[in-house]
Amino acid sequence: DQQVKQNSPSLSVQEGRISILNCDYTNSMFDYFLWYKKYPAEGPTFLISISSIKDKNEDGRFTVFLNKSAKHLSLHIVPSQPGDSAVYFCAASGIGQGAQKLVFGQGTRLTINP
Amino acid sequence: KAGVTQTPRYLIKTRGQQVTLSCSPISGHRSVSWYQQTPGQGLQFLFEYFSETQRNKGNFPGRFSGRQFSNSRSEMNVSTLELGDSALYLCASSLRTGTTGANVLTFGAGSRLTVL
């Protein structure tokens, strides 16, 4: 039962353009969503989060959009830079006991081409 | 300030053996979580500890166990290893103590286990 899904295993974007990474979820009880970036041989690094009561959160070049009715969120990176090439994971957390764990998607490998 | 430290970084075991992985969280972080990453599966939650108590456990068999010490350091153990246990095991710590707000985890670099 994959509650958080990233349907695109990979994405290739030209440097300077916008990168859009997508994530879908099935559990309407999730109350926070987070994005992590992972380089090879390193642990995932937190990028940005959004509360389920918001529809947008922005931090520098990174913006996360949440569409609760569609159970969909997306991460926009503008402008894309070569250092953004990594695997991106979206994750969600619930409430109560579910708040102790993050449920991750399978990841999307982003490649930024010069 | 030092990040999350995991040891060993790489290890090779054979089927039937057992393994213990260690994690030192960021100083001041009392919550420690463990995740298993395999190709195509993303990160799967194993368990979470806070103040030496397991607060939540994922859907893994009883061969997977863990503990947390009074200094917040944590270990996880896998007994009777199977080929399918080959994975990257990630430890993460969090400053959050309750259940409100975003649970921002800081991950270590992981321990890559290969079972032959």
Image (cartoon, coloured by chain):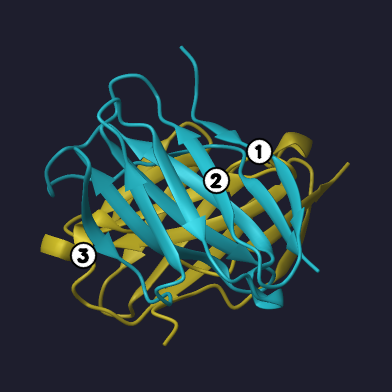
Chain colours: A yellow, B cyan
Mark 3 or mark 1, whichever is nearer to me: 1
* Vertical comparison of A57 with B45: above or below: above
Residue B11 point in image, percent of width and height:
74, 48
Where's residue B21, x and y in %? 55, 45
> In the drawing, what numbered circle is on residue A103?
none
Name the amino acid, label 2: Leu
Which residue is at a point 22% across and 41% down the rendered structure image? B52
Instruction: Point out the frontmost of discs 2 and 3.
Output: 2
Q: Which residue is mark 1?
A: B8
Asked whether residue A12 is in view, the answer is yes
Q: How many marks?
A: 3
> Numbered disc 3: what chain?
A
Q: Kindly check if marks 2 and 3 are in contact, taking CB atoms under 8 A apart as contact.
A: no
Q: Chain of mark 2?
A: B
Nearer-the-camera pick, B22 or A45: B22
Relative side of B25 to B79, left or right: left
Q: Is residue B90 left or right of residue B74?
A: right
Report the amino acid beneath label 1. Pro
- Nearest the viewer among A1 and B50 is B50
Q: Are marks 3 and 1 in contact (CB under 8 Å)?
A: no
Give the mark nearest the N terminus, 2 or 1: 1
Q: Residue furthest bottom?
A: A1
Tell me, yes or no, whether the two marked residues, 2 and 1, touch with CB atoms within 8 Å: yes
Which quarter of the figure has residue B38? bottom right
Q: Residue A16 placed where, x, y %? A: 74, 40
Residue annotated with mark 3: A98
The residue that label 2 is drawn on is B21
- In the rendered image, residue A88, in percent from the top left (x then y), is placed at 60, 54
Secondary structure found at label 2: strand
